[in-house]
Structure formats: C-alpha cells, structure tokens
Amino acid sequence: AQSVAQPEDQVNVAEGNPLTVKCTYSVSGNPYLFWYVQYPNRGLQFLLKYITGDNLVKGSYGFEAEFNKSQTSFHLKKPSALVSDSALYFCAVRAPWATDKLIFGTGTRLQVFP
Amino acid sequence: GAVVSQHPSWVICKSGTSVKIECRSLDFQATTMFWYRQFPKQSLMLMATSNEGSKATYEQGVEKDKFLINHASLTLSTLTVTSAHPEDSSFYICSARSLELGASEQFFGPGTRLTVL
C-alpha cells in the first residue's frame, strides 16, 4: 500500500536560515511525489513535483526538493526562510498506475521566526 | 491558469438540513474532480473521485447516500451533504485534474468550511 510519512509535526526556523521539511514514502514502482502548502482556511497550493529526471526539483517561492530513491525520501528545502513561509506543508505520493489517488502525509507546520 | 473555485467559502447550517458545495474549474476542463475532507490539524482524506458524466467512486467508509456527488459538466462538480449533523462539520476541499494539463497533477480549490449547529 502507498503511504507517506512526515515525521515532524512542526518545524521551527529563524528567518534567513535554511529550512528542511522531511518526507518519506512507501510505494511500489517509481512514485510521483508532490509538495503542497496550505495557509489558514485556504486550499492547497502546489509547490513542486517529481515525476522523473533530475533528483533535485525546483519549485515555487524558492523551494526545492530532492528525490532520494535509496532512502525513499523527498525532503523539501529552502536556502533562506522567510516569515511568510510559515504555513502547513503537505507531502503527497501517487503510484504511477493509480492516476486518481493522491495519498497525503499528515502535514508539517513550518514556523519561521523573525 | 488552472484555477479551481469553490462556493461557498463557508457555510453554517442547522442539524438535519442539506448543504450543497460547488467546485468549478474556471479556465480548464476537468475530466476528473476529487473531494477531500480535512479535520482540524489533520491531513486531507479523499472522500470520492468523480468523472464527468459518470457516478462517483467513493472511498471506503464514506457514505454515498450522505455525501452526494454530481459531476454534471467538465467544469462543475457538486457535493451535497444530506441531513447534516455536527460531526459533518469539517473543511471540504475539491481538486480537479485535466488530461490536457497533464494527468499527474491536481489543482485544488480554496476549500469550504462547513459548520453544522
């Protein structure tokens, strides 16, 4: 069965410091991986995705994520955090054959302090 | 591009009444739409998948008679919560997928907060 784990409920980082939000997955075959961000009382906004190709994926708002097949991870990173990055981040996985179903992690709340 | 809207953004209703939530793809044709439910501080749980012109496919544990989904056109899907009860209070989010935009990605609406008194 497909699953996604986000081991940290919350990540705290000072503005200007690099940030990492962790995600590991379990899926047979080559996964499709996604990161979304959610602001309070809002829907999800797409940040980036990995389908195939370069393991380092660059996305919106300066975020990037690295696909690591051996560690089954897809951690979200940003070199320099902004206070406005504070939000809820979701990692999601989709098996290549399951075109209809995204499985979401439990979310990680990122808090960036000035 | 790829904008999905939901209406209403929030709704308060009395227990026993029915509530309809609309999900529209504004600038693309959505071959498939999805309905999710999100409880406070929790992840999104897929409720059902609907393809235009056909019956929705519900996830295990989701009552199809309670959560009626209609995907009447390529730009509109509706979720009707029938005989709502306080435990149905939640944040409902729809998403849409388009073959012309690439089947790998879903575009999410802003969500509808339902409060049942």
Image (cartoon, rainbow, N blue to C red):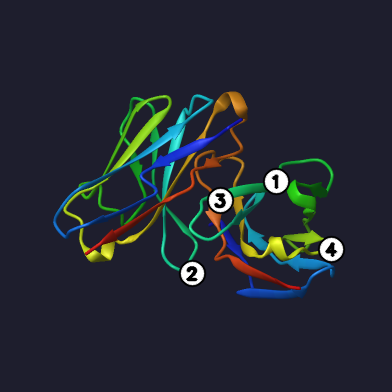
Asked if one can make out residue A32 in the rendered structure from this viewpoint, the answer is no
- Tell me the SS state at disc 2: loop
Count of numbered circles on the image: 4
Marks 3 and 2, how far apart at CA: 14 Å
Eye-nearest disc, 1 or 2: 2
Q: Residues within 10 Å of mark 2 (few under 14, many from 20)?
A: few
Q: Looking at the image, do the residues carrying marks 2 and 4 touch, with CB atoms under 8 Å apart?
A: no
Residue B15 quadrant: bottom left
Q: Looking at the image, do the residues carrying marks 3 and 2 touch, with CB atoms under 8 Å apart?
A: no
Chain letter for mark 1, please: A
Query: Which residue is label 4 attached to?
Result: A80
Residue B41, numbered label: 2
Q: Nearer the viewer, residue A48 or A56?
A: A48
Query: Which residue is label 1 attached to?
Result: A49
Do the residues at pointers 2 and 4 share their chain? no
What's the amino acid at mark 4?
Answer: Ser
Eye-nearest disc, 4 or 1: 4
- Tell me the SS state at disc 1: strand
Query: Which residue is label 3 attached to?
Result: A44
Q: Residue at x 22, y 50 (%)?
A: B66
Chain letter for mark 3, please: A
Chain letter for mark 4, please: A
